Structure formats: structure tokens, C-alpha cells
Amino acid sequence: MITYKGRVGVLGATSIIGECLLPLLLEEGWDVVAFSRQARCIKQPSENQSITWQLLTKSKLPDSSDVHQTEKQITFWISLAPIEVLPEYFSMFLIYGAKHIVAVSSTSRFTKRTSSDPAEKKLAENLAENEERLESWAKKENLTFTILRPTLIYGLGRDKNVSVIAAFIRRFAFFCVFGAARGLRQPVHAQDVASCCAAALGVNAAINRCYNISGGEIVTYREMVCRIFSALGRKPRFVAFPLWLFRLAVCLLRIFPPFHHWSAAMAERMNQDLIFDHEDASHDLGFAPRPFLPTLKDLHGYCQNEK
């Protein structure tokens, strides 16, 4: 029999992590209120469902009357939305009676702060600034928090990392690299990130702590791409580009939807080590990430679109 744990609100519930997290929370005995800005995902729960969906709009966030009508407070929260938008919901959290918030940030806070791309450098600054805003606000309002910083997330074919590389391979039958592409990586599966989010709800050691959460295996960038080739049933085929040509190629690639966010700085990082120790998360949260062995299911989304 499942033991009832309480009510938890999930912000950004239709994200890749949310897709993994919601069924996990139900299995663990949580009553879930899922918040999303995507109206097509909102559905009325049946009598036996424990997930209540609520639509968020920029023009109207839930207010005190909404909480009074439902007579439901939400003391635990997991935010999967970009952490830079989290302050927009501070007042909503207070209205619902929030006591503890688990927020997902990113190790890009560290890896992109010296990027040659101004947009990436700005992203790193925003991540750091909004982590600090959450900490300051929580202290002011007498709330507690846990911040999780995943490395490169993949899974379900919905990520903007591994699945986009797979889309490139499907379209062009090769992958372009800069130099030897020997920088180290730790891809982390969305399901493992979701498990860590759920664990952070009920562990006292995680209160007011920040954790870097990385994959269970360290591989070079080149090996990471080789395994994507393998998952697609293809023989690895690389083409080495000089940086100037990579910049030109990226400008052309941006006309295709999966590659809108690519930049030349990505090529520069192919030879940089972007690895993070997750020992603290393993000790406090039981975090045990899988090795990087992507399946067709992990790559399905963008590949499907590219057929």
C-alpha cells in the first residue's frame, strides 16, 4: 500500500523532467498539482487520478481566491521551469502556503560564464543571479529550498542536446567536430534528474543546499557522439572543421528548427572538460545515475521530426 506523503506542486510539469517526474511522485504517494503554460496538456482529472492540472498564463497567475476555492494548500514545490523565470512565481508560492521549494538550475552557471558567445555568458549570469534571488527570498520569507544543477540532460527525445545531435546525424549522416573533441562530458538522463527532485522533497540534509548532479559515466565528447551513432544503428563518421568554417556552418544550420540554439561556442567546448562531482547528491539524496547508453527511445523525438 502506498503511504500518502502530502501535496506537491510541480511548476513546468510538461517539461522533459516533468514527464518523468509526475508518475514517480504518484508512485511515491504524493498528491500532485501540475502547473503548465501549455493549454493542450491541461486535462480534467478523472475520479481516480491524483494529478490536478492547472493552466498558467502571463496575464493571470493563481491568486488567493483560487486557493480558497480549492481549499488546498501546497507546502512542497518542485520547479522545473527555467530558474530565471522563477521569481515571477514567488507571490504564488506564498499564496499556496509554500514551505519548501526544489528548483532545477544548471551547471551552465559555471561552464558558460567564460563563453565567447555573449548570449551564453548572459545565461550563466542569469542562472547565478536567480539562484541567489531564490536563496535570499526563501530566507526572507522563512522558507527552505534545494537547488539542483544537472549537467547535459538527455532522454525521451525531447532534450536540446543528445537528441539534436541525433537529428543532425539522421539528416546529414555525419557529425562535424572541432579538433579532437576530447573534452570530457557526463550526460545525465532526465529520469535520474526526476528521481533526484523527488528525493529532495523529504531529506533534511538537502534543506538549503545546492547540488551538482551529473551522469554516472565520464566520456569524451567524441565518444558521446559515437554512442549516439551506435544507438541509431549507424557507423560513426566525423568531419573535422576549422573554427571559422564551424561558425559559417552554424549560421546555415540555424534555419533548421532543431538547431536554432547552436553557436560556435559549442565547438570550442568540444575540447573542454565539463564534469562535476555528484558525491554530495549521492550521499544525501541517494542519487545513482546510469551510465551513458542512449536508446532509440531517448533519441526518438527529434529523429521522428527529421524523417
Image (cartoon, rainbow, N blue to C red):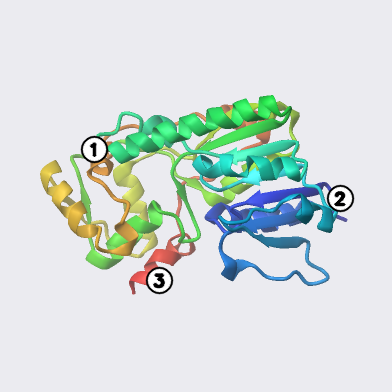
Residue type beneath disc 2:
Thr
Using the image as rendered, state which of residue 274 and residue 104 is in the foreground.
104
Residue occupying the point 22% across, 57% down:
237
Query: Counting residues from the N terminus, which is met first, the one under dot 3 or under dot 1?
Result: 1
**Left or right relative to 270: residue 231:** right
Where residue 55 sits, quadrant-wise, is bottom right
Using the image as rendered, state which of residue 196 and residue 84 is in the foreground.
84
Query: Counting residues from the N terminus, which is met first, the one under dot 1 or under dot 2?
Result: 2
Q: Is residue 199 visible?
A: yes
Badge 1 marks a residue whose secondary structure is helix
Using the image as rendered, state which of residue 32 and residue 93 is in the foreground.
93
Badge 2 marks a residue whose secondary structure is loop
Look at mark 1 in the image and give the residue it sits on. 268
Residue occupying the point 57% across, 36% down:
148
Q: Is residue 69 above or below residue 127?
A: below
Look at mark 2 in the image and give the residue it sits on. 3
Measuring from the top left, give residue 64's x and y in whole percent. 76, 49
Residue type beneath disc 3:
Gln
Mark 1 is surrounded, within 10 Å at the Cα level, by few (under 14), some (14 to 19) or many (20 or more) other residues, namely some
Residue occupying the point 75% across, 36% down:
99
Using the image as rendered, state which of residue 163 and residue 296 is in the foreground.
163
Measuring from the top left, give residue 200's x and y in whole percent. 68, 37
Q: How much space separates mark 1 and mark 2, taking CA atoms?
A: 49 Å
Residue type beneath disc 1:
Glu
**Left or right relative to 262: residue 55:** right
